[in-house]
Each structure stands twice: as C-alpha cells, then as structure tokens.
Image (cartoon, helix red, strand yellow):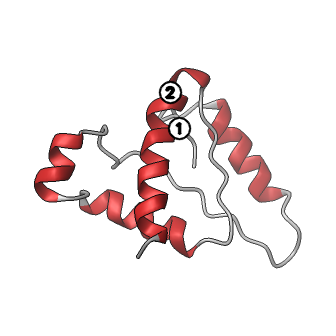
Amino acid sequence: MSGSLRRGSYNSALLRAAAELLPEGMTLDIVTLDDIPLYNEDLLSDAGFPESVQQLRARIADADAAVILLRVQIVQPIQKFLHETLHSTLAL
C-alpha cells in the first residue's frame, strides 16, 4: 500500500518494482487508497468504518504480510489509523 495518490508517486513505483522482483510463487497485491476517506473519529463512532475501510481491513487481516510506504509527514495519522484498524481486526 502506498500512502500517495499521485500517479507518479515514487512509493507506488517502488511497490510496482518490488512486485516484479518477487520470487516465483509469491504475489504482491498493490492496494490504493483512492477510496479510503480521511480519518474522522466522529463518523467512526456514529456509523462504524466505511465499506472501503472494512474491505481494506479484511485484506490486511487475510495477508501474510503488509508493505506500507508513506511520506514522513503523514506517518502519525496513518500510524493511528493502522493501530486502531489492526487492533480491532486482530481482536475479532
């Protein structure tokens, strides 16, 4: 998963390059954040996670591993989201 939505993102390019270099039998599903809304705790407490976030949570929970590439400026908000998402996903 790349934290950038830009088509020319270096992080997204790194993921595509990594997918080409994987050993035989290994796969890398590249997930975009195009449909993931900004984190809003008010919405979460009112209606739960949006459908797109629930799907992302399920993909993370089903994965053997996750590679997440982010810019330093957005690490804290994304880290909070991942902590809450993984904590609640693994507690199921």
Residue 55 found in image quarter: bottom left
Name the secondary structure under disc 2: helix
Badge 2, how many Cα within 10 Å: few under 14, some, many 20+?
Answer: few
Badge 1, how many Cα within 10 Å: few under 14, some, many 20+?
Answer: some
- Is 30 left, or right, of 92 in this rendering? right
Q: Which is nearer the eye, 22 or 86?
A: 86
Residue 56 found in image quarter: bottom left
Q: Residue at x 24, y 39 (%)?
A: 40
Q: Which is nearer the eye, 80 or 4?
A: 80
Give the farthest residue toward the top. Answer: 73
Name the secondary structure under disc 1: loop
Measured as percent of width and height from the top left, residue 80 is found at 45, 40
User: In the rendered image of this protein, does residue 78 appear above or below residue 51?
Assistant: above
The three-letter code of the residue at mark 2 reads Ile
Q: Which is nearer the eye, 59 or 5?
A: 59
User: Mark 1 against mark 2, which lies toward the viewer?
Assistant: 2
Measured as percent of width and height from the top left, residue 10 is found at 67, 31
- Is 24 left, or right, of 13 in this rendering? right
Image quadrant for the C terminus? bottom left
Q: Are marks 1 and 2 in contact (CB under 8 Å)?
A: yes
Q: CA distance from mark 1 to mark 2?
A: 8 Å
Circle 2 sits on which residue? 74
The three-letter code of the residue at mark 1 reads Gly
Sequence-wise, which precedes: disc 1 or disc 2?
Answer: 1
Q: Residue at x 13, y 57 (%)?
A: 47
Measured as percent of width and height from the top left, residue 54 is found at 34, 64
Which mark, by number, is residue 3?
A: 1
Measured as percent of width and height from the top left, residue 67 is found at 67, 52
Q: Residue at x 48, y 49 (%)?
A: 82
- Is 30 left, or right, of 32 in this rendering? right
